[in-house]
Amino acid sequence: MNQSKTLQKLVSLLGDSENDPKLQALFIELGEKFPLRRPRKGDTGYLLEKENRSYQLAMKYADAIPLLKEDKKFKEGELVFYSLQNIYYNSDYDDVVFPFNITWDLNTKKAIELLGEDYFKYDNSENVFLWRKENIIIILEFDDEDYLIEISYRLLIDYDLEILNKHGKK
């Protein structure tokens, strides 16, 4: 499977259970083993990292994600795929079209044209822009020369809701 398709599939599976056959099949293809380990005591999730993969996958307990807390389809202690993160620029990705048509040639102006003017930023972050697309947060980080250097996608979490409310956005 090519990189663009793999990344598109991963974003489409955000919010899916560790028990979902499609998620398991793709994760196994990416080198993960099932059953997945549980988070450390006191943690609600963890990152799945591989040396041969230039991004991280994140799992979290369903009841720790605001959008899923009340969802009865998840059992107590069930993990959910909630983030595809830390995709840093490298030449292997030159021809990759990321979910939501994101490409490495974006600068902040092009990103706003593509994703919309309804973005938000975390406090004290000049170069990190976030967009909400339904229940997914797209995070783009630019360097001081306005080159895209990092891409992440994740399910909406409590902190995002706080920032959105603070800025009068929902």
Image (cartoon, rainbow, N blue to C red):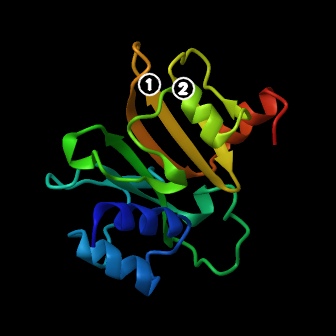
Q: Is residue 157 above or below residue 29?
A: above
Q: Secondary structure at mark 1?
A: strand
Tell me, yes or no, if residue 33 can be seen here.
no
Disc with the residue nearer the chain's start (2 vs 1):
2
Q: Is residue 75 above or below residue 160?
A: below
Residue indicated by mark 1: 142
Label 2 neighbourhood size at 10 Å, few (<14), some (14-19), many (20+)? Answer: some
Residue indicated by mark 2: 108
Side (left or right) of 49 relative to 86: left
Q: Position of residue 156 (x, y in %)?
A: 63, 50
Tell me the quadrant of the picture where the C terminus can be found.
top right
Q: Identify which residue is drawn at 57% across, 65% down.
A: 62
Residue 135: which quarter of the image? bottom right
Tell me, yes or no, if residue 83 can be seen here.
yes
Side (left or right) of 35 relative to 21: left
Q: Identify which residue is drawn at 43% across, 41% down.
A: 151
Q: What is the three-letter code of the residue carrying label 1?
A: Phe
User: How many numbered discs sit on the rendered protein?
Assistant: 2
